[in-house]
Image (tube, grey):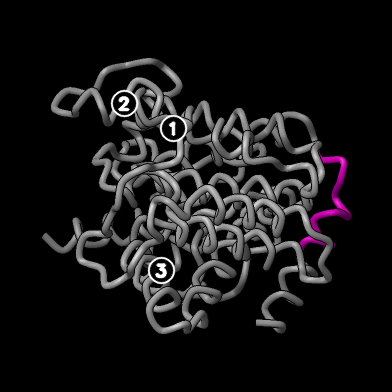
Amino acid sequence: MDEKLFQIEAKRKQLDNYKPLPIELVKNLEEWFRIELTYTSNAIEGNTLTRQETAMVVEEGLTVAGKSLTEHQEAINHAEAFNYIKTLIDKKRQEITARDILDIHSIILNKIDDTNKGKYRNVTVRLRGSETILPNPLKVPELMEEFIKWVQSDTTDHPVKIAIDAHYKLVSIHPFVDGNGRTARLLMNLLLMQAGFPSAIIRKEDRSIYINSLEKGQTKNDMNDYYIVMLEAVDRSLDIYLEAVDPERTRVSEPNLQQRFYTTDEVAKLLQVDPETVRRYVRQGNLKAVKLGGKFIRIDKADLNIFIEGLKK
């Protein structure tokens, strides 16, 4: 883990060299992260809105046919909760309070479960399909008090480790009837942003790996898989920022099949077509792409795989 943290810290310092970032670029990135975090975090919990549908609901206030009212509200709430944690970035970690966490949770469950929003659970809960035994509800207030003291404590641990440990500790306490995962991921990202790092995105396709890594830690006290998953998420987000401020950074002679995002030229090499053909696929809506920073188009590996599978049919 130390080696990965060293790499992550080196990338953060690289990013710092570009600061202050152009205002428009920052706005573009923040909007992209807000939608992506909303889509992925809700998808991990079972929300079926697609990435594009999530953007439609959050940015345009549209209703998606065939999707439940709860799914719509989950998207709206998560986007608002992300906006809320951004107002807390200037706080120091030592100033985070239980009230801040309760407020995040209250936004997450707003108009979904108004009875339990912003309140610790007073009932026993179990995780479906999991062997994890969660704390007795009578212990939750005490455990949360200890958790807040830990968050506020002075420590020599790297801020990224503190953030991902905070996520693990909070979901393991499971202080709420519902919304624990979303609240914990938002708290983690608040701590990351306070320390100068971008938000970490746990991809929808990594859901099983992520959940299994949590259970492995909770039932076997083996955190190795968990740290791998979470540090990779932080690392990917740093790459997104670095690629946005310096598009040439990812223009390699041969595409790396392990990377998360591809440039137009890299996709052209993978598909063995010219770059203009790739642009045409994007314009026609056959291949999804994200525009970050001027004219720099990035294509998500998951979307590229879907496109390639479609070509085979």
**Numbered disc in front, either 1 or 3:** 1
Q: Disc 1 to disc 3, how far (Cα)?
A: 40 Å
Residue 7's quadrant in the figure?
bottom right
Q: Disc 2 to disc 1, how far (Cα)?
A: 8 Å
Query: Is the Cβ of the residue at disc 1 closer than 8 Å to that at disc 3?
Result: no
The quarter of the image holding the N terminus is bottom right
Q: Which mark is residue 290?
A: none
Q: At x 32% / y 36%, what residue is drawn?
A: 284
Q: Which residue is labeled 2 in the image?
A: 112
The quarter of the image holding the C terminus is bottom left
Is residue 280 visible in the rendered structure shown here? Answer: no
Q: Is residue 105 magenta?
A: no
Q: Which mark is residue 270?
A: 3
Q: Which residues are magenta?
A: 12-21
Is label 3 in a helix, a strand or a loop?
helix
The three-letter code of the residue at mark 1 reads Ile
Percent position of residue 250, x then y: 63, 64
Is residue 303 visible in the rendered structure shown here? Answer: yes
